[in-house]
């Protein structure tokens, strides 16, 4: 069986091999003989995973099997009536290959060709290409970690009492940062015979049997400090990603404004004046501390009076302009 609990421990769900899902509320467990609600009929394929996605005003229960992804509302504000939302028959999830991803309010499912995102109401809504047979999928903050096989165990290794690491199966561990409008690979490396991936204590822990004589080795992946992440992206001129991460990560307003300024300057140097102005004006919309005279002088020097007028109009709309 597979089980899931909510963060407050107020709800429990267990999916079993008969295809049924048993659901308990916290108040039910205080009864002498607590009886669960059975919210999926037997006769379905064995349940491979159950997950709760807590969305503030409501809680959704996802259930996966080999053929489909199903979802129910189990709490909507103070109403605990169970209501079926969606059954997506386009594909299911193997064991250990699904996880909830609150950043985009979705369930992620790892399959051979990609990582798929499932909306509770609409089902499969997007995919991130990532080829290879998936073994494990987990979530950490706004990252998901996928373990993909790169081969099968050596036949001779299976009969050896102490196989060497070189003869053991290899997997790729890929850590992706995912926001609604931005997804990219933050880390990727090869490991030997990965058995578990655990997100805990502010880090990602990888268990690998790649030590001497096949002993288990524990690896710890730490997220880089925000300032270092932004510096890497800006140096690679990935300004849009850097700005979004700065906003999502709570960077200082001065830091975020500088990213927009450098992005605008890069476009301005290419004489992409309209695109540059759109970037500069984002600092006005977000209330970021970019000195208006810097932008005005740039466009006056280039004799782009219409752009100056447009920028000043934006300042007036935000009540940020001063009369001189």
Image (cartoon, grey):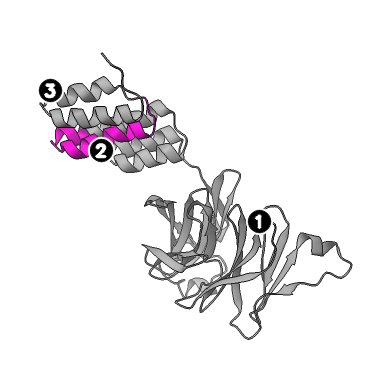
**Residue located beneath label 1 in the image:** 77
Residue 280 painted magenta: yes
Lateral position of residue 9 relative to residue 47, left or right: right
Q: Which mark is residue 278?
A: 2
**Residue located beneath label 3 in the image:** 301
Residue sitting nearer the eye, 47 or 38: 38
What residue is at 39 percent from the left and 26 percent from the top?
254
Q: Quadrant of the N terminus?
A: bottom right
What residue is at 37 percent from the left and 32 percent from the top?
256
Is residue 148 positioned above or below 324 on the image?
below
Q: Residue furthest right?
A: 32
Give the spatial CA distance, label 1 vs label 3: 57 Å
- State yes or no: discs 1 and 3 in contact (Cβ < 8 Å): no
Residue 88 point in image, percent of width and height: 49, 75
Give the spatial CA distance, label 2 vs label 3: 18 Å
Is residue 321 positioned above or below 212 on the image?
above
Instruction: Determine the secondary structure under disc 3.
Output: helix
- State yes or no: discs 1 and 2 in contact (Cβ < 8 Å): no
Residue 136 point in image, percent of width and height: 51, 63
Q: Please tell me whether mark 1 or mark 3 is closer to you in this view.
A: 1
Lateral position of residue 196 relative to residue 275, left or right: right
What residue span does the magenta drawing correspond to?
Answer: 266-289
């Amino acid at each position: 069986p597979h089980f899931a609990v909510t963060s407050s421990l107020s709800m429990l769900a267990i999916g079993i091999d008969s295809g049924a899902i048993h659901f308990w509320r916290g108040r039910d467990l205080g009864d002498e003989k607590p009886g669960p609600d059975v919210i999926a009929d037997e006769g379905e394929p064995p349940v491979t995973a159950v997950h709760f996605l807590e969305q503030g005003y409501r809680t959704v229960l996802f259930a996966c099997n080999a053929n489909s992804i199903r979802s129910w509302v189990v709490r909507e504000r103070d109403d605990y009536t169970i209501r079926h939302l969606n059954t997506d028959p386009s594909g299911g999830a193997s064991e250990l290959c699904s996880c909830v991803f609150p950043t985009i309010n979705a369930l992620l499912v790892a399959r051979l060709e990609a990582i798929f995102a499932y909306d509770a109401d609409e089902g499969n809504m997007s995919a991130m290409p990532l080829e290879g047979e998936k073994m494990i999928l987990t979530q950490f903050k706004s990252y998901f970690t996928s373990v993909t096989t790169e081969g099968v165990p050596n036949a001779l290794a299976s009969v050896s009492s102490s196989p060497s690491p070189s003869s053991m199966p290899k997997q790729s561990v890929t850590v992706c940062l995912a926001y609604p409008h931005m997804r990219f690979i933050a880390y990727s490396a090869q490991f030997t015979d990965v058995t578990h991936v655990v997100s805990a204590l502010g880090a990602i822990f990888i268990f690998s049997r790649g030590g001497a004589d096949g002993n288990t080795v524990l690896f710890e992946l730490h997220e880089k400090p925000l300032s270092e992440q932004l510096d890497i992206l800006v140096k690679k001129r990935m300004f849009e990603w850097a700005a979004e991460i700065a906003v999502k990560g709570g960077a200082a307003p001065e830091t975020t404004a500088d990213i927009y300024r450098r992005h605008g300057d890069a476009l301005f140097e290419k004489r992409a004046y309209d695109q540059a102005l759109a970037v500069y004006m984002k600092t006005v919309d977000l209330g970021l501390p970019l000195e208006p005279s810097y932008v005005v002088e740039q466009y006056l020097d280039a004799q782009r009076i219409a752009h100056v007028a447009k920028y000043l109009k934006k300042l007036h709309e935000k009540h940020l302009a001063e009369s001189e």
